[in-house]
């Protein structure tokens, strides 16, 4: 006998789970979606269109275009970037080399090159610094353009990158304002040739010889050997004492009773003799000039004389001029004034005090009369003078218990 059929939940067949994977999580599917998403019409003027027309198969054309055409495109862009970078660097190097090796500009002789060969070296250093800056900027620009051409072909959205780069640049602009200011100031200092290595400059608190000029800082060495590092963004003024040419400035003081015309003739002869000197003459650019009476001092008449020299030679010329002026004035008896304080001579007797204008006192420039052989009477001033050491000795004994 057959029993009744079983009905209920146990008799219900459970459907098998679906084993088909999600297409969105399959890398192969994502790659195929990226490959076939690109349009490839037969009449398209592209590599894929040419393949479509040749193979008469759109999917095959798309696969070959993605597998072969994209690497070829990336390689072509990179090769073009390399060629463009090489050409730009070559042009910059040739321009720098032309500046370094050519002492003549546009058919005329450069005045500075005839005066000092160091100017040529300085101009070469400035040209090389600017050339290095330009080559770095060209390299960055070329590779940025190449990246903008390649990334969209690889499926990267550059709009987000550009927006992110703008945000990062804005943050850097606010956070590194001093750094940007230093770099910009350094670029203009080098381009405008405000100073260079070997110049003697005054930056306010720091002054000395320039040892290095960078885009961010300038290094100076003072006369006492102190090394100063100055940020270019903090420089508000620069005094260059050795650019192009220099000038030795001499203010010669003579006594009022001296003949000014005669003194000026003597100074002119000294300057002319220094100009003819075989050792120092070549560093003097022009004949020394006498500008005449510059000022009236308390004890002297000031006569100004200038000598135009090559850069950094003005101090040596000024020292040699002072030495020759002193020797010549001593030989000719020209008096150089100096402060002469009045001398009071005290004598005993009626009318013993004599001032500097009295007849009994020696005149200016004269020696006081010799003291008599006999000792003069002791006065109150002498007693007070002798009492000072005694009082000092007593005080030392009181302060020192070991004495």
Image (cartoon, rainbow, N blue to C red):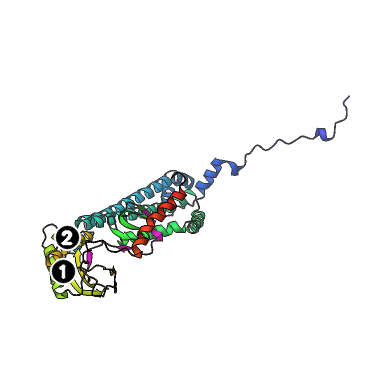
User: Percent position (x, y) of residue 209?
Assistant: 30, 55
Which residue is painted at 15% across and 64% down in the image? 330
Residue 188 appears in the picture as rendered: no
Name the N-terminal-most of marks 2 and 1.
Answer: 2
* Direction from residue 18 to residue 226 in the image, left or right: left
Residue closer to the observer: 170 or 202: 202
Image quadrant where one finds the N terminus = top right
Give residue 119's position: percent from left, percent from top.
Answer: 22, 58
State the residue at coordinates (43%, 56%). Answer: 179
Q: Which residue is identified by label 1?
A: 334
Q: Quadrant of residue 184?
A: bottom left
**Residue at the top extreme?**
1
Q: Which residues are magenta?
A: 228-250
Q: Would you identify the image quadrant in which residue 353 lies? A: bottom left
Measured along the vertical axis of the image, is residue 182 above or below residue 22? below
Residue wearing tag 2: 283
Compare residues 323 and 219 and report the one nearer the observer. 323
């Amino acid at each position: 006998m057959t029993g009744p059929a079983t009905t209920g939940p146990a008799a219900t067949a459970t459907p098998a789970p679906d084993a088909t994977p999600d297409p969105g999580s399959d890398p192969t599917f994502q790659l195929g979606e990226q490959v076939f998403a690109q349009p490839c019409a037969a009449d398209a003027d592209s590599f894929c269109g040419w393949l479509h027309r040749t193979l008469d198969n759109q999917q095959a054309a798309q696969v070959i275009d993605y597998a072969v055409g994209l690497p070829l495109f990336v390689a072509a862009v990179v090769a073009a970037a390399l060629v463009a970078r090489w050409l730009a660097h070559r042009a910059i190097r040739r321009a720098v080399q032309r500046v370094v090796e050519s002492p003549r500009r546009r058919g005329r002789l450069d005045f500075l090159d005839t005066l000092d060969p160091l100017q040529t070296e300085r101009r070469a250093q400035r040209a090389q610094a600017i050339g290095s800056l330009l080559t770095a900027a060209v390299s960055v620009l070329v590779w940025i353009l190449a990246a903008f051409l390649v990334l969209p072909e690889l499926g990267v959205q550059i709009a987000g990158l550009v927006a992110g780069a703008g945000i990062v640049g804005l943050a850097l602009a606010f956070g590194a304002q001093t750094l940007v200011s230093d770099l910009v100031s350094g670029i203009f200092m080098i381009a405008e040739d405000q100073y260079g290595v070997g110049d003697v400059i005054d930056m306010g608190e720091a002054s000395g010889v320039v040892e290095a000029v960078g885009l961010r800082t300038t290094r100076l060495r003072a006369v006492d050997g102190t090394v100063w590092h100055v940020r270019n963004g903090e420089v508000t003024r620069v005094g260059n004492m050795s650019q192009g040419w220099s000038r030795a400035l001499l203010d010669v003081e003579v006594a009022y009773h001296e003949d000014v015309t005669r003194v000026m003739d003597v100074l002119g002869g000294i300057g002319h003799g220094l100009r003819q000197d075989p050792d120092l003459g070549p560093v003097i650019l022009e004949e020394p000039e006498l500008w005449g009476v510059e000022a009236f001092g308390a004890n002297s008449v000031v006569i100004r004389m200038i000598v135009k020299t090559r850069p950094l030679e003005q101090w040596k010329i000024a020292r040699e001029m002072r030495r020759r002026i002193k020797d010549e004035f001593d030989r000719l008896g020209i008096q150089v004034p100096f402060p002469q304080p009045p001398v009071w001579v005290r004598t005993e007797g009626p009318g013993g005090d004599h001032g500097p204008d009295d007849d009994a006192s020696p005149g200016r420039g004269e020696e006081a009369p010799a003291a008599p052989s006999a000792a003069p009477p002791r006065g109150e001033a002498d007693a007070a003078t002798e009492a000072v050491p005694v009082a000092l000795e007593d005080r030392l004994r009181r302060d020192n218990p070991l004495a």
